[in-house]
Image (cartoon, rainbow, N blue to C red):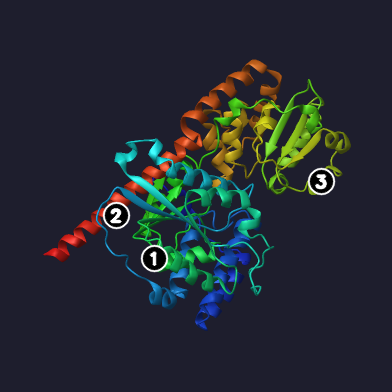
Amino acid sequence: MHANAHQTQHPLVMPEHVGSQLKRAMRLANEGDHAGALEGIASAAIADIQAAQQEFLGDIRGVGVFAEVTRLWLAQWIAARSETPSPRAPTDVVRLLYVVPNVSAGHAASMNLVRLVEWHTRQHERAGAHGAIRVEPTVLVCEEFTERTPPRAHLSFKSMPSRTAGADFIARLEKRCRVEILAADGTYLDAAEAGIAHARAARPDVAFFVGSPACAVQTAIAAARVAPVQACLNIGVPMLSPGIDAVIYNNRAKEARDEAFVRTHGAEVLGVTTSGGDASIGARLAPFPRGEMGLPDGVPVVASMSNVLVRRMLAGTFARDLAAFLRRNPDVWWLGIGFCDPAPFHKYLETVDGGADIRRRCVFAGGWQIPWGMLKSCNVLLNEYPEGGGNSVIETMGCGVPVVAMQAGPRHAECIGAELVGPDAIPTNDIDAYWRLAETWIRDPQAAAAAGARQRARALAELDYGVICDAYERIAVDLCRRRVWAASAAELATADT
């Protein structure tokens, strides 16, 4: 069967929250308001990704719709700014530009960016890696998701500038490479104009766009073409807009489903198992004292970890199922780790039979930059569903704490946890099996220890950020060799003759 055959068995239906935004954007495009059209496209994507759990963009055909309207509605603006980068002969350096929406503490993509940049710039410590080719990174921060001056009519965000929200990360990046942060002034197209100038000044061979259709500035910069080869480093919903030559998936299941469609858009499909996590640090840290987290000693503790934990718990049946699990197991406690407000979950428990006792055994520890010690104080991690985490799963596996994860659906966040834990994953939507496995592991320490050791070995061998950073670096070098230096050599040879 074709890789995405299941997606063509039903018509693609555009929901109202997407259609209304795109209708307005089309009107603005017809009026020649390219900035307004671009912002309308981004606002439609944001509504679908953040509020509707990718109802439309979870299907790669929906991503194709966004790519096509971007191509049509910004055609005049793109044509006026598009350039073909000059050919460059092969050398021992690959200039790699990372284009990112924002940098923020507690954001997995920001942490991964820092790790990637630090990995590239430690190249001299790995003599001979990749045939002695060095990767020299530059970072362009677009300030997509912070308040703009003046405020925009259809895209409104809190003031979260990267130099404030991600100060430590920015400092680490600036120690290693050149970092440009765009001003959050004017329209998103104004920002794109400045971004194009900064990007071209860096003269990259390869550009990695860490974004989605929700990223207005990145979409415009990619469309203008700032590097000979441009790839979307996919973090959930790929950016398949004009100028994207390759999509690098970090979820093998979604890669397989999307591949045929992405190729019809002229983009290459590449993949890494995940965007990486720190699996090795867990072995070096001691468990955090339970008493300091409000947990009693000597009881089974299950945990969940996410910076959007409560939203995910309440999006489906996870909160209800967790309450039922805790009711069946009155000695078990639950620990929630992450930057989130527990009030909506507490309010939900008011409607649940035995909710007061369940709330007593549910502890929210807040957000932590270094959560590994907290994880090691627990018996099992429950990866929430239908949407669950990725980095949190890797970090927990690295601690030797077994993770219960389920294939809850085809979208990235619905299946990434199961992809990571591998053979221990629960099949699609088998909720009873999910909770049976959790109960088995909290009641059978030997089975839990065996699962923890199995998952830890997998994490260290395949998912640790060192392994993943090396994989991304190899992709950058390979893209440059195949699509930049080879093409440049051919053009130079033609010019000489």
Identity, as a three-letter code, of the amino acid under mark 3? Tyr
Tag 1 secondary structure: loop
Which of the pair 103/40 is nearer the observer? 103
Discs 1, 3 touching: Cβ within 8 Å: no
Provide residue 277's location: percent of width, then percent of height.
54, 38
Say which mark, if any, is on residue 225: 1
Distance, label 2 to label 3, CA atoms, is 54 Å
- Hey, which residue is sitting farthest bottom in the picture? 31
What residue is at 44 percent from the left and 50 percent from the top? Answer: 258
Query: Disc 1 versus disc 2: distance between alpha carbons?
Result: 14 Å
Q: How far apart, in angstroms, are the residues tagged by discs 1 and 3? A: 49 Å
Which tag, 1 or 3, sits closer to the chain's start? 1
Q: Residue at x 52, y 84 (%)?
A: 31
Q: Quadrant of the C terminus?
A: bottom left
Q: Earlier in the sequence, mark 1 or mark 2?
A: 1
Q: Residue 312's x, y, as percent?
A: 68, 46
Dot 1 amino acid type:
Arg
Residue 272, can we see it? Answer: no
Residue at the disc numbered 3:
348
The answer to whether mark 1 and mark 2 are in CB contact below 8 A is: no
Q: Is residue 150 above or below residue 305?
A: below
- Left or right: residue 376 compared with residue 277: right
Residue lying farthest to the top in this orientation:
446
